[in-house]
Image: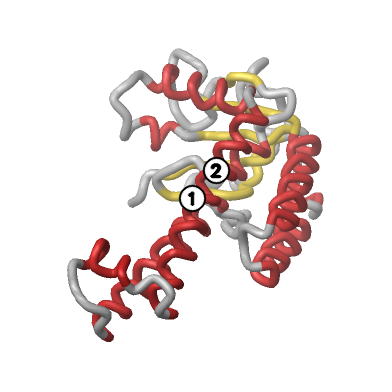
Amino acid sequence: MANRSYLYAINFDRTLRKKQDSDSIKGVSENNYEIPLIHKILVSQESKLSPSIIWEYDHPISIIGNFYKGKEKLFDFLIDLKQRGYYDHQDLDKLIETTKIFLNDESNSGAFAYLEAGELYMMGNEAFEIQNQKIYEEILNYNQMISDFYKMIELKNTEIIALKKIISGKNKGFLNFIFKSSNSSADIEKINKEIYRIESEKHALLCVDNWSKHLYFDFSNK
């Protein structure tokens, strides 16, 4: 099983008390091996460090934020992202529409967005609460977090453009620098695979298509 980041919509403030039988914990999204930007954005408004709902742990290792304000922040971000042209417009339009349909559905909503990343903290070398504090501080510095994301995407787009120029014959000399060989069909195949890998990384960094009511840790029947 992959270690995951989990995002829930909950109707109680976990910083004040534990879950009661009448409380709601709804699955929203999960992601393998890292906390995606969308999870951070959705807990970015009125954020607080919170105890876990999954782990028995003495310190706060989760993050909670205003669900509805976080949702609007995410929609604003996606509009800005589209205007910058970092992703294919048609693909991004579909993802934005899917995101709005899911998050605007009250059956997927709650007063609070709630981020659980204890499984990912297991992979680190520091105490869970220290790792969680670092994520919390990153979220609090929201503008820098978004700026860092854009820089990563810009860099990946620059790499893709350079690789496409090689294929088109505009930058054949660069082929030797990458593959130490001539412009053969095998090399072109390698370049296309590299482009696909970078595009996949771009997709994973955004991770705006993992909406689901049913997460590995499902509280719907608890």
Along the line of sight, the residue nearer the viewer: 54 or 209: 209
Spot occupied by residue 2 in the image (x, y as percentages of width and height): 35, 50
Q: Quadrant of residue 8?
A: top right
79 or 32, which is in the foreground?
A: 79
Residue 155: which disc?
A: 1
Q: Is residue 105 above or below residue 19?
A: below
Tag 1: residue type?
Answer: Leu
Residue 82, x across and y down, in percent: 72, 57
Q: Nearer the viewer, residue 157 or 4?
A: 157
Which dot marks residue 30? none
- 2 and 1 marks in contact (CB < 8 Å): yes
The reply to whether residue 85 is visible in this rendering is: yes
- At label 2, the amino acid type is Lys
Give the residue drawn at x 58%, y 49%.
Answer: 29
Left or right placement of residue 4 versus residue 12 in this view: left
* Disc 1, SS: helix
Residue 72 picture location, percent across and down: 80, 42
Q: How many numbered marks does the figure carry? A: 2
> Which image quadrant for residue 168?
bottom left
Image position of 9 (left or right of 193): right
User: Is 170 rendered above or below residue 122?
Assistant: below
Q: Quadrant of the C terminus?
A: top right
Residue 83 picture location, percent across and down = 75, 56
How far apart are the two marked residues, 2 and 1, measured between alpha carbons? 6 Å
Q: Is residue 68 above or below residue 93?
A: above
SS under mark 2: helix
150 or 176: nearer the eye? Answer: 176
Crowding at mark 2 (Cα within 10 Å: few <14, some 14-19, many 20+): few
Q: Which residue is mark 2?
A: 151
Residue 196 visible in image: no
